[in-house]
Image (spheres, grey):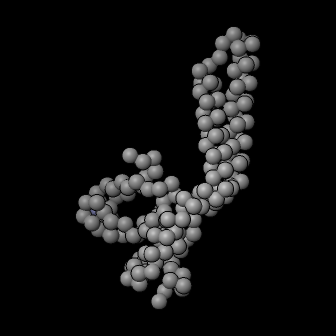
């Protein structure tokens, strides 16, 4: 089971669906129900050839801020522990837990920051763009998007 998933109730049969996604929900917004195979538009999915990549996946400064922010949080919690031990002789497990969480989140942000800065993340995203471009080459697919009221730029209309 993936950490990233979307859930919905099918508009035709009403049954519950749950689908794993990549981190930024890249994929066709035309989805099918597992139960009745009904088709509909789900705008939570991102057709990257049309909409571009999620800004959060290319904005490195966001993760630098996150990295610093979580590190500060961990530092404050660590100082709290030191203060608590000095004045009361004990500390709360919750504080230690917060330090660990802050450090982990900080490292995760740092890794993403590096990945975006070095272009590794863009490389990782390239296949999604290729797939999306391929879908958009198909006039029947483009027509279907338009019929669902999806905004398709003129460059893809033939
Ligand atoms: Zn259905």
- In the orientation shown, which residue stands out farthest toward the left? 36
Please tell me in which quadrant of the rendered image residue 139 appears.
bottom left
What residue do we see at 71% from left, 54% from top?
61
Image x and y of residue 50, in percent: 53, 74
What residue do we see at 33% from left, 65% from top?
32
Image x and y of residue 140, in percent: 38, 82
Image: 139 above or below 122: below
Q: Is residue 32 left or right of residue 114?
A: left
Q: Is residue 114 visible?
A: yes
- In the orientation shown, which residue stands out farthest toward the top? 89
Q: Is residue 48 or residue 80 the one in the foreground? A: 48
Please tell me in which quadrant of the rendered image residue 120 appears.
bottom right
Image: 138 above or below 16: below
Please tell me in which quadrant of the rendered image residue 90 appears.
top right
What residue do we see at 62% from left, 49% from top?
112
Q: Quadrant of ligand 1?
A: bottom left
Q: Is residue 79 left or right of residue 91?
A: right
- Count every numbered label the image shows and give the total: 0
Image: 8 above or below 136: above
Q: Is residue 36 or residue 54 the one in the foreground? A: 54
Q: Is residue 13 visible?
A: no
Image x and y of residue 101, in percent: 60, 33
Image: 11 above or below 110: below
Image x and y of residue 21, in percent: 44, 56
């Amino acid at each position: 089971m993936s950490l990233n998933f979307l859930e919905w109730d099918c508009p035709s049969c009403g049954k519950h669906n749950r689908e794993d996604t990549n981190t930024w929900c890249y994929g066709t917004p035309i989805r099918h129900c597992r139960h009745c195979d009904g088709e509909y538009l789900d705008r939570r999915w991102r057709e990257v050839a049309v909409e571009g990549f999620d800004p959060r996946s290319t904005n490195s400064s966001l993760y630098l801020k996150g990295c610093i922010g979580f590190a500060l949080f961990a530092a404050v919690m660590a100082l709290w522990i030191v203060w608590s031990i000095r004045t009361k002789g004990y500390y709360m497990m919750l504080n230690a837990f917060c330090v660990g969480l802050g450090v982990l989140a900080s490292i995760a942000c740092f890794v993403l920051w590096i990945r975006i800065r070095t272009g590794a993340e863009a490389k990782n995203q390239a296949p999604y763009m290729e797939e999306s471009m391929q879908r958009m080459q198909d006039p029947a697919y483009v027509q279907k998007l338009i019929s669902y009221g999806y905004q398709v730029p003129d460059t893809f209309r033939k």
